[in-house]
Image (cartoon, grey):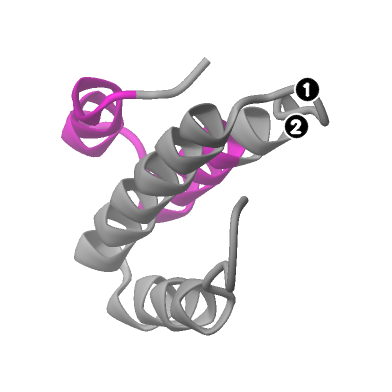
Amino acid sequence: MVYTIVDIEKVLGYKTWSVRKKQDELLRMDCNMYCNIGRDSTKAAKLEVRKASRKIYTAIKTIDNNMGTLFLQTMDLDKPKGPL
């Protein structure tokens, strides 16, 4: 399952959750997506997961600038060099 911006915004919108809990939930969503990618996944599916992951890291950056920046920088260093 690829999470949407609606799911991400829902987590960010919880007022009773701490920053840590929000980060944990967003990273759980990211982990879940990557765990469900298999060898038989299409290139399009892998690309969608990567796009959703970038949205998650950008959301993390809004609540914790340092952590979000590190995730995005690491993602940029690990750009695919060819077909996924």
**Is 1 situated above or below 69?**
above
Residue at 21 percent across and 30 percent down: it is 5
- Tag 1 secondary structure: loop
**Is 47 situated above or below 58?**
above
The local crowd at label 2, few if under 14, some if 14 to 19, many if 20 or more residues have their Cα within 10 Å, is few
Amino acid at circle 2: Cys
Residue at 20 percent across and 63 percent down: it is 62
Q: In the image, which residues are magenta? A: 4-30
Instruction: Locate residue 7 relative to residue 31 in the image: left or right.
Output: left
Amino acid at circle 1: Asp
Pick whichever, 80 or 34, lies toward us. Answer: 80
Q: In the image, is residue 17 part of the stretch drawn in magenta?
A: yes
Q: Which residue is mark 1?
A: 40
Instruction: Locate residue 66 relative to residue 29 in the image: left or right.
Output: left
Q: In the image, is residue 76 part of the stretch drawn in magenta?
A: no
Percent x, y for residue 40? 78, 22
C-alpha span from label 1 to label 2: 13 Å
User: Looking at this rendering, what residue extends furthest in the top direction?
Assistant: 1
Give the main secondary structure of the magenta stretch.
helix
* Label pair 1/2, CB-CB below 8 angstroms: no
Residue at 59 percent across and 76 percent down: it is 78
